[in-house]
Image (cartoon, grey):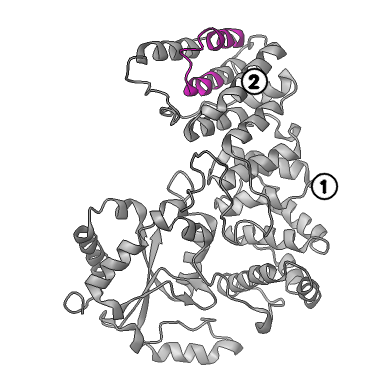
Amino acid sequence: MRRPRGEPGPRAPRPTEGATCAGPGESWSPSPNSMLRVLLSAQTSPARLSGLLLIPPVQPCCLGPSKWGDRPVGGGPSAGPVQGLQRLLEQAKSPGELLRWLGQNPSKVRAHHYSVALRRLGQLLGSRPRPPPVEQVTLQDLSQLIIRNCPSFDIHTIHVCLHLAVLLEARPEELTPHVMVLLAQHLARHRLREPQLLEAIAHFLVVQETQLSSKKLVLPFGRLNYLPLEQQFMPCLERILAREAGVAPLATVNILMSLCQLRCLPFRALHFVFSPGFINYISGTPHALIVRRYLSLLDTAVELELPGYRGPRLPRRQQVPIFPQPLITDRARCKYSHKDIVAEGLRQLLGEEKYRQDLTVPPGYCTDFLLCASSSGAVLPVRTQDPFLPYPPRSCPQGQAASSATTRDPAQRVVLVLRERWHFCRDGRVLLGSRALRERHLGLMGYQLLPLPFEELESQRGLPQLKSYLRQKLQALGLRWGPEGG
């Protein structure tokens, strides 16, 4: 079984993203400690590194022990010296003093001390009225200390160091496109929804618009479900789409996929990608299938979310199922998923005939669990019902028959949606863009969604508790059924 992405391990993890996150053949971002090395070694002058570290106050965080042997800060035989060094770093009066404390106490230095030193350096460089003078060699030496020691950092310390070393409220346009692309990939890959960093990428994209391949810079916004506050972000992307659509079809649909997740699809770009010329052009390319899948999803978004669109659409013969099976990320993490135990709970509670697992519904969304219920709330055997709601759902020439069928069919279709930990950004509160899009579209098609959040599932101790939890969830929707198991 492969290790979940974003977790520390002896080897760099392989990419396992779903189709909505990256194009075929797209390179995966480096491991976190490689990312930290690149970002710190990219700085060549005190002015530039000072700009990077002129940071606003960051939220206090618990800098826990390294998984490579650090002892907890609050306990153990070495807790006293370790805490003492932390206090010295927090009270340092100059960058040179910071460096001396780190360099003269190698036996007491732990991984988290470097993030403490970076935070204090940012405070010193941002002090008023006059920050202390900083020699270039001091900054370079501190960077080299972190670069040399970051292989021993745990994932949390690496992320803290990245956050502190790369925060830009200064001049992000001074960084190179290569560094910003690495940052964008790192945020997307590790589900880090950091508003300040994302705003810096958006500003960089606007400032460097004419010199960039923008696909990789746009990727984290859709994946992390984050619409920047930068006012020129959308006008900039519309100009890029108008300029590149004819020469970079895969980049064009990748950008549109991100905008689709953000519910910001520009009509002009849709007119272009649904035009016969564009569709005929991509049909002869190596990426034809993945582009058609993207276009099929965009067509679904137009159908469900853009009632005012009157332009061309993807012809029916060109449409393919969007996601005909669970995404790669779910298959890779099946060992950690709650799907099997939820399936067993439903089997014992309802019986095997009254739910379907991993059923793909038109236009191609894979559901976790689907139930059919009568208008009075009785759960019905799925084999006696058509489990699919008609698509397209609204009255239109190609959907008139389907609409009339809907009025004659009072049965409800209930979709139980597993919300696993990796379906969210790392803060655990915001669904990833692809997940939010899937739930939004299923709801607009008429399916009644019953989310099962990972926090609630993880709190159930054993199958009896889980069955009780599922019973309460289903009854809260007004559903009823016969004796358990039948």
The amino acid sitting under disc 2 is Gln
To which residue does mark 2 refer? Answer: 144
> What is the C-alpha distance between the residues marked 2 and 1?
34 Å
Q: Which residue is the site of mark 1? A: 210
| Residue nearest the observer in this picture, 330 or 87 | 330
Res 54 visible = no
Image point 29% across, 83% down: which residue?
380
Q: Residues within 10 Å of mark 1 (few under 14, many from 20)?
A: few
Name the residue rendered at 57%, 47% in the picture.
189
- Inspect the magenta stretch and tell me whether residue 169 lies in it: no
Asked if residue 69 can be seen in this view, the reply is yes
Farthest residue toward the left? 483
Report helix, strand or loop for mark 2. helix
Q: Residues within 10 Å of mark 2 (few under 14, many from 20)?
A: some
Check the image and report above or below for 162 versus 303: above
Residue visible at 58% across and 20% down? 122
Name the residue at 45% across, 13% down.
108
Question: Could you tell me which quadrant the C terminus lies in?
Answer: bottom left
Which sits in the foreground, 20 or 261? 20
Total numbered circles = 2
Mark toward the start of the polypeptide (2 vs 1): 2
Q: Which residues are magenta?
A: 95-118
Q: Position of residue 227 (x, y in %)?
A: 59, 50
